[in-house]
């Protein structure tokens, strides 16, 4: 590539065959710079980093299996009479879409397996994206400079649910048809444009004859293209930022500690693709998913009890179930100015999901504003070391789970032999108090774990060996930690609340006061990392039990 | 000094130490010393790991063979039974799983046991230099300045206006995605046709129902006569017109004024489409006379004209006025007096009777 090198007389000659191939490609298309940059790039290693990989790999599996399915699926809603080999449905009137889905299941060799692989990996895809986001949230990986990548990840979460839902509806079976019916009902509840939107989406009245082919286009073209685009952006930013790493000895914000991409990390990550594929194949082999032949073709009249949406739609469905439609004799649905305000559908369908996603998108900026922390962070927080953030995350998670559980309220009632109404009443209560309890409990647990860390850092770990001292006292012998293990327990920041500071005009405005209040709320309960002086003091006294008081005498009260 | 703790198990509550900055911190001891694996020191162990990796790759080959055998040896034929499908599916899955897991675990084992496992530390470089950062801001400022967009509000405002209007054609072409709703949602097949009242027929076979067939306590899933004969739009009509027919003791019904003659001999017909989001209200509790929607558990009380007694629905199920014709068949004396199914924005204008 360099101009100093004459093209016909390369000075350097590669000796190995691998080297010669590399050199051949490089001399024609370039890329030695890229290889130099990435060939040995260091990646930190941790099991929790694999969730993102699972998401990526299940998306690849989705593309592979989905391509196979498109060869046989026909998204037409034209009427036909089933003539395939599944006997119970012989001659039943159904749509071509449903009939071709049955053909994929029963008459295309390997088709059943592909359908199962596709559906299982779709469920796994949304699940791994969600768990990956939880990991990123609880470890604080969204902090500067990765806020934008967090936004891209949030968009990916929404897109993955959109991909799932559009695909779920395609077979035009009874179960997914009822799902579409619910979507139609929710759309119709939108003020002003609801009815029109429903007619446009379905090409007329529900169910019409257009919706499957329209969803098909979204499912195989638009949504996957957007997902692919977002994945490219996501990975590009991972490369730009380099990966975060967990705290520990030798790791700081200025370095990356881990294995070089080639060969170890590439081998582990590449091998992991095959493991994910293998596990999905095992699930597809032995666990039936979405047995559409049991449900029958879509018909607006029948429905079976105990039906469930795919898991990721559950929280919206559950919210719909929790909302009371009447309070006493007062109807939640209101008629104002001759028009319908369907609050019993609108509120649960839009508000909880709206709050969850808005807070999710905005959280990096909210926390940055409260903490005024404008530094770059490449070392993750252990969740216990950011008790308030962890508590906020758990409150949101529990809120989501309450709604999600509500989507199975009928199954909870039948499985545990309790009244359906009671299940709903309890879940309604939990909808409000669940997040509060989760916040308080999580924060206390996080602080307790921090204290435990301090205890271990200062006094060592319990050995289980009980020793009797000459004067008769029994003590348990504690083994001191080596410095590497200890550093993991003490090497974190514990910021103090940041009081309000005047702005450039020398005024503490109301916004700043509010921020200071939030900062106090965020940081006031904290456990400081143990210091060398405290360790010294703890060791100065023989006997671990005395060290507590010893450490205490080293400190002063700060508030 | 009494009200703080260092986090010892006997003290709880807020913990604080003196200002963080003054307190010295533990020094980072650096990356822990590398520990050699067995395979690094013992050639026998390395050889063993090598054989294990090869064995795993071998298992993958076996998996691929299982897949191929299952694919070609099991013939689905013209009438494949569920058992054959299940067997083939299990074997294809098992074959794929072995093939993939063999390769995957083999490579990972290879990487973990035999490839160098020294942890390396690499410097992070700033995403950009401070100089670039300032230059970038300056360039953007210069570009904006050179366009003069701030100094020429006329250009800016007309551009904004043009850009705001430009998507309108796109909206217009999306307007043909479907017909205008008009009042189609307000009408169902139950409206009398050419002066002839529609008979209530069984769902799905379409045979008409005689009032004498409806015994006390029974329930029927009902469609309008002639629905099955529709050549197009059958599901659309069905989605609006399905009805539940039940017979109660006449004294258990408490019809409101104006609805006394909507029932026949204790037989009542209600729309089966939930007023919440449109699922079929398919469950009838015979003892309590409650109708339950399996989707979101809205519960309607038949003895109170299907008033909502639990769940997310707000409105009662619309009632279909019925009677019998000269041959003793149940007929709808008119269409529903209000739109069935989920609420929509214009619904109120389509309601015929205010007290429903």
Image (cartoon, helix red, strand yellow):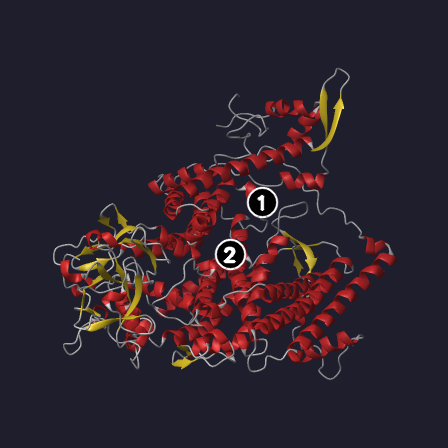
Q: Residues within 10 Å of mark 1 (few under 14, many from 20)?
A: some
Q: Is residue A74 above or below residue A556?
A: below
Q: Position of residue B89 (x, y in %)?
A: 60, 71
Residue A436 sits above or below residue A16 on the image: above
Question: Counting other residues with Cα less than 10 Å from the Cα at mark 2, is it few (<14), some (14-19), or many (20 or more)?
Answer: many
Q: Helix or strand or loop: what does disc 1 sit on?
A: loop
- Whether residue B151 appears in this view of the structure is no
Name the one closer to the observer, A406 or B136.
A406
Q: Chain of mark 2?
A: A
- Residue at image location 58% in from the left, 48% down from the top: A380
Residue positioned most to the top? A471
Quadrant location of the N terminus of chain A in the rendered image: bottom right
**Quick check: A87 above or below A313?**
below
Of callouts 2 and 1, the N-terminal one: 2
Q: Position of residue A119 (x, y in %)?
A: 52, 67
Q: Mark 2 highlights which residue?
A: A130
Residue that badge 1 annotates:
A382
């Amino acid at each position: 590539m360099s101009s100093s090198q004459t093209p016909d007389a390369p000075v350097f000659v590669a000796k190995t065959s691998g080297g010669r191939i590399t050199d051949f490609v490089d001399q024609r298309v370039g890329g030695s710079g890229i290889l130099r940059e990435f060939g040995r790039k260091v990646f930190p290693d941790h099991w929790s980093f694999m969730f993102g990989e699972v998401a990526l790999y299940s998306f690849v599996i989705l593309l592979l299996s989905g391509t196979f399915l498109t060869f046989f699926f026909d998204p037409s809603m034209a009427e036909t009479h089933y003539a395939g080999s599944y006997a119970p449905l012989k001659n039943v009137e159904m749509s071509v879409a449903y009939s071709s889905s049955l053909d994929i299941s029963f008459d295309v060799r390997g088709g059943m397996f592909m359908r199962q692989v596709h559906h299982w990996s779709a469920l796994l895809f949304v699940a791994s994206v969600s768990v990956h986001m939880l990991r990123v949230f609880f470890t604080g990986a969204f902090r500067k400079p990765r806020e934008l990548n967090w936004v891209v990840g949030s968009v990916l979460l929404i897109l993955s649910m959109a991909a799932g839902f559009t695909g779920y509806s395609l077979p035009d079976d009874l179960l997914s048809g009822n799902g579409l019916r619910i979507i139609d009902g929710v759309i119709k509840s939108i003020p002003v444009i609801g009815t029109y939107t429903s007619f446009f989406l379905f090409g007329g009245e529900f169910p019409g004859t257009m919706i499957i082919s329209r969803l098909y286009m979204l499912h195989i073209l638009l949504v996957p293209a957007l997902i692919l685009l977002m994945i490219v952006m996501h990975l590009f930013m991972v490369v730009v930022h380099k990966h975060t790493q967990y705290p520990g000895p030798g790791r700081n914000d200025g370095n990356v500690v881990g294995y070089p991409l080639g060969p170890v990390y590439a081998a582990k990550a590449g091998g992991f693709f095959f493991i994910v594929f293998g596990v999905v194949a095992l699930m597809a082999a032995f666990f039936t998913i979405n047995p559409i032949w049991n449900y029958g073709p879509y018909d607006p009249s029948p429905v079976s009890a105990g039906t469930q949406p795919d898991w990721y739609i559950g929280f919206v469905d559950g919210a719909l179930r929790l909302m009371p439609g009447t309070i006493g004799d007062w109807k939640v649905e209101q008629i104002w100015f001759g028009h319908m305000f369907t609050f019993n559908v609108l509120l649960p369908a839009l508000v909880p999901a709206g709050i969850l996603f808005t807070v999710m998108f905005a959280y990096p900026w909210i926390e940055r504003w409260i903490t005024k922390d404008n530094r770059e962070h490449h070392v993750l927080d252990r969740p216990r070391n950011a008790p308030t953030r962890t508590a906020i995350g758990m409150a949101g998670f529990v809120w989501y789970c309450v709604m999600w559980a509500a989507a199975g309220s009928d199954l909870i009632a039948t499985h545990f032999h309790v009244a359906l109404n009671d299940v709903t009443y309890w879940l309604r209560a939990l909808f409000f108090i669940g997040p509060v309890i989760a916040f308080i409990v999580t924060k206390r647990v996080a602080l307790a774990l921090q204290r435990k860390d301090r205890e271990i850092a200062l006094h060592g770990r319990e050995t289980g060996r009980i020793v009797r001292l000459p004067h008769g006292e029994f003590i348990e012998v504690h083994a001191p930690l080596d410095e590497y293990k200890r550093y993991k327990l003490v090497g974190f920041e514990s910021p103090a609340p940041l009081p309000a500071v005047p702005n450039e005009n020398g005024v503490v405005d109301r916004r700043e006061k509010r921020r200071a209040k939030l900062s106090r709320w965020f940081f006031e309960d904290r456990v400081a990392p143990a210091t060398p002086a405290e360790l010294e003091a703890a060791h100065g006294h023989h006997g671990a039990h005395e060290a507590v008081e010893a450490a205490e005498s080293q400190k002063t009260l700060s508030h | 000094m009494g009200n703080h703790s260092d986090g010892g198990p006997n003290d709880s509550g807020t913990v604080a130490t003196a200002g963080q900055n003054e307190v010295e911190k533990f020094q980072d001891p650096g990356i822990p010393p590398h520990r050699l694996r067995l395979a690094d020191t013992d050639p026998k162990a390395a050889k063993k790991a090598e054989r294990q990796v090869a064995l795993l790759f071998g298992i993958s080959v076996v998996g691929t063979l299982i897949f191929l055998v299952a694919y070609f040896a099991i013939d689905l034929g013209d009438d494949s039974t569920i058992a054959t499908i299940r067997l083939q599916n299990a074997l294809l899955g098992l074959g794929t799983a072995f093939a993939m897991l063999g390769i995957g675990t083999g490579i990972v084992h290879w990487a973990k046991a035999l490839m160098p496992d020294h942890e390396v530390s690499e410097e992070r470089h700033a995403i950009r230099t401070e100089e670039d950062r300032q230059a970038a801001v300056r360039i953007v400022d210069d570009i904006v300045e050179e366009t003069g967009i701030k100094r020429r509000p006329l250009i800016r405002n007309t551009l904004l206006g043009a850009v705001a209007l430009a998507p309108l054609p796109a909206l217009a072409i999306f307007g043909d995605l479907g017909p205008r709703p008009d009042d189609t949602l307000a009408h169902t097949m139950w409206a009398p046709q050419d002066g002839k009242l529609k008979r209530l027929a069984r769902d799905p076979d379409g045979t008409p129902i005689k009032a004498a067939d409806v015994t006390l306590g029974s329930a029927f899933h009902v469609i309008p006569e002639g629905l099955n004969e529709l050549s197009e739009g059958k599901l659309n009509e069905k989605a609006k017109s399905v009805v539940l027919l039940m017979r109660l003791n006449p004294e258990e019904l408490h019809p409101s004024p104006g609805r006394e003659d909507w029932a026949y001999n204790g037989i009542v017909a209600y729309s089966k489409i939930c007023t919440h989001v449109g699922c079929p209200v398919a469950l009838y509790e015979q003892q309590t006379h409650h109708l339950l929607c399996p989707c979101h558990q809205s519960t309607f009380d038949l003895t109170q004209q299907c008033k909502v007694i639990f769940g997310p629905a707000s409105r009662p199920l619309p009632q279909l006025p019925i009677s019998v014709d000269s041959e003793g068949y149940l007929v709808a004396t008119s269409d529903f007096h209000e739109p069935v199914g989920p609420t929509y924005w214009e619904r109120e204008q389509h309601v015929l009777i205010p007290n429903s």
